[in-house]
């Protein structure tokens, strides 16, 4: 005989569970939490989550005791998801977001508080994006500089792989938080991304309204892991094989990080993306990077636009860091310059016809021989973030007359009889030092070509001449800074005079 008390003890939890079962699956998406930043006007922020099929969901935005708006939707039967789009909101806060699920006579309520409206930026890539504030120059000072930036909120996605596209994040390393020295410097290559944080800090200094920063990165990963299957197919990327390259130390299987760390964020309304990746492709599908990178940008844009029901701009701003330098012998001397060139879809500059509404921070002059994390991980992320934010101000925020890229030649004249090559730049140039090796000409004779140094000769505010008398044949091409380590720290020969932005690397054919 079973004691009555035991029976009651068994039955009561079952009764309670039956009463509550309709609310068990009711929740916000994983990244909707206290202290978050939602995208401000002109877009509407997306609030979504999971619930019981058929239930009604009411989302209320409140400030203090005042109800700002209510939105009503229902849980989709096949996906167990619900979604509302808030009316566009001006920057500011704090607000409370409340979601209530109603099914028959049962109500279940969720709340997140201290929610701000501002601009939301997603930061992704490999280890140079993953490096934390603890790892940069003057780390102690940077970690303590948080008091003025409590409206810059940070979130860091956990490094996870998946074979299929996931609806929601499996985990986050750092849920939405106000910045502290502890969560900005939580170990090496953990959280928070230094480039992401410093970029956001610059934006806040300029804009003076809330900024939300989401870091989703993983060291040692090639672009193929961050790309959807359709974008890789569009570029003819070979089917997955083994990857015996020293440069690839993280997950390399096609799409596994797209599936787990990017796709789950697609419903979020974003302002833009910043990206720092490419080192793991210096000898892995290198020749395809001029397709895979523009294809990734296009695919992310389409996916986030569609996932947010059109709230994220179709061609949202996409910024990236052109690769810095490395002393290691893991790659041929051509790998880094090739990727740098392919990062611009072989134009040498952005935005360009294949990469509209993009901006780039040149970093080849920010080398770091003594980095304790290896020279491939330079510690000056402050200058990287500063250069990135200039591009954002110009492209994303439409700031006029702001120089955000270094000088490139707009005209090249071959003065063969004088043994000179004359370069006219579309911006002013500052010749910081003469370098007789950084410019190279392709010299051809007897159907054979080789690269020879072209020494810097005379220069003016917007022009530069190179001596090409070392070529006894025909000069057919010119390249600049086409090496893994083109110059020492901030010591490249050419910069823009007022912005201190370095001239980017380039390669071009020369016609008579």
Image (tube, helix red, strand yellow):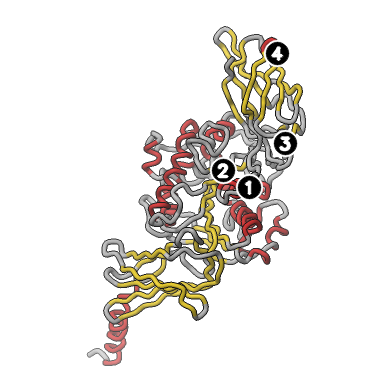
Residue 56 figure quarter: bottom left
Looking at the image, do the residues carrying marks 4 and 2 touch, with CB atoms under 8 Å apart?
no
Q: Return the residue at label 2.
A: 359
Looking at the image, do the residues carrying marks 1 and 2 touch, with CB atoms under 8 Å apart?
yes
Task: Judge from the rendering whether residue 289 lies leftward or rightward of residue 429; answer left or right.
Answer: left
Pick the quarter of the image with the C terminus.
top right
Q: CA distance from mark 1 to mark 4?
A: 39 Å
Residue 494 figure quarter: top right
Percent x, y of residue 463: 71, 26
Pick the quarter of the image with the N terminus.
bottom left
Which residue corresponds to the image point at 63% horizontal and 61% vertical from the top-left?
Answer: 208
Percent x, y of residue 173: 52, 61
Q: Return the residue at label 4.
A: 419
The 10 Å Cα crowd at callout 3, few under 14, some 14 to 19, many 20 or more, is some
Task: Judge from the rendering whether residue 317 lies leftward or rightward of residue 489; answer left or right.
Answer: left
Q: Return the residue at label 3.
A: 488
Q: Secondary structure at mark 3?
A: loop
Q: Is residue 43 above or below residue 33?
A: above
Q: Return the residue at label 1.
A: 390
Q: CA distance from mark 4 to mark 2?
A: 36 Å
Q: CA distance from mark 1 to mark 3?
A: 23 Å
Q: CA distance from mark 2 to mark 3?
A: 24 Å
* Dot in front, 1 or 3: 1
- Of mark 1 and mark 4, the one earlier in the sequence is 1
- Of mark 4 and mark 2, the one earlier in the sequence is 2
Q: Secondary structure at mark 2?
A: strand
- Of mark 1 and mark 3, the one earlier in the sequence is 1
Which residue corresponds to the image point at 62% horizontal and 32% vertical from the top-left?
Answer: 505
């Amino acid at each position: 005989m079973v004691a009555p008390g035991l029976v009651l003890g068994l039955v009561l939890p079952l009764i309670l569970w039956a009463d509550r079962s309709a609310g068990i699956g009711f929740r916000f998406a994983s990244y909707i939490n206290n202290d978050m930043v939602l995208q401000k006007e002109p877009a509407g922020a997306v609030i979504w989550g999971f619930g019981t099929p058929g239930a009604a969901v009411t989302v209320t935005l409140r400030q203090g005791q005042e109800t700002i708006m209510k939105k009503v939707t229902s849980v989709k039967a096949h996906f167990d998801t619900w979604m509302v789009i808030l009316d566009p909101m001006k920057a500011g806060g704090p607000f409370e977001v409340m979601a209530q699920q109603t099914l028959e006579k049962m109500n279940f309520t969720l709340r997140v508080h201290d929610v701000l409206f501002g601009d939301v930026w997603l930061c992704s890539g490999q280890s140079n994006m993953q490096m934390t504030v603890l790892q940069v120059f003057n780390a102690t000072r940077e970690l303590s500089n948080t008091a003025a930036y409590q409206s810059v909120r940070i979130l860091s996605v956990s490094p996870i792989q998946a074979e299929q596209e996931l609806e929601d994040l499996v985990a986050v390393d750092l849920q939405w938080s106000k910045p502290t020295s502890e969560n900005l410097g939580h170990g090496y290559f953990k959280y928070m991304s230094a480039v992401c944080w410093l970029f956001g800090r610059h934006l806040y200094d300029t804009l003076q309204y809330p900024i939300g920063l989401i870091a989703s990165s993983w060291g040692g990963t090639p672009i193929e892991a961050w790309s959807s299957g359709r974008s890789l197919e569009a570029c003819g990327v070979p089917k997955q094989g083994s990857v015996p390259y020293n440069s690839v130390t993280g997950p390399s299987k096609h799409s596994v990080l797209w599936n787990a760390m990017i796709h789950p964020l697609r419903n979020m309304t974003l302002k833009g993306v910043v990206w720092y990746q490419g080192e793991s492709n210096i000898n892995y599908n290198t020749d395809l990077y001029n397709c895979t990178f523009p294809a990734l940008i296009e695919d992310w844009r389409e996916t986030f636009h569609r996932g947010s029901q059109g709230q994220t701009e179709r061609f949202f701003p996409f910024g990236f860091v052109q690769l810095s330098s490395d002393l290691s012998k893991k790659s041929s001397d051509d790998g880094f310059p090739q990727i740098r060139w392919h990062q611009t879809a072989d134009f040498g500059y952005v935005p360009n016809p294949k990469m509209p509404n993009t901006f780039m921070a040149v970093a080849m002059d920010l080398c770091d021989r003594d980095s304790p994390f290896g020279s491939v991980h330079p510690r000056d992320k402050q200058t990287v973030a500063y250069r990135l934010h200039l591009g954002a101000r110009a492209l994303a925020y439409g700031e006029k007359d702001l120089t955000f890229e270094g000088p490139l030649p707009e005209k090249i004249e071959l003065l063969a009889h004088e043994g000179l090559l004359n370069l006219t730049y579309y911006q002013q140039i500052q010749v910081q030092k003469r370098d007789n090796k950084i410019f190279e000409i392709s010299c051809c004779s007897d159907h054979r070509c080789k690269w020879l140094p072209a020494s810097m000769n005379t220069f003016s505010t917007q022009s530069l001449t190179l001596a090409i008398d070392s070529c006894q044949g025909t000069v057919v091409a010119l390249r600049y800074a086409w090496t893994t380590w083109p110059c020492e720290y901030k010591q490249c020969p050419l910069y823009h005079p007022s912005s201190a932005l370095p001239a980017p690397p380039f390669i071009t054919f020369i016609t008579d």
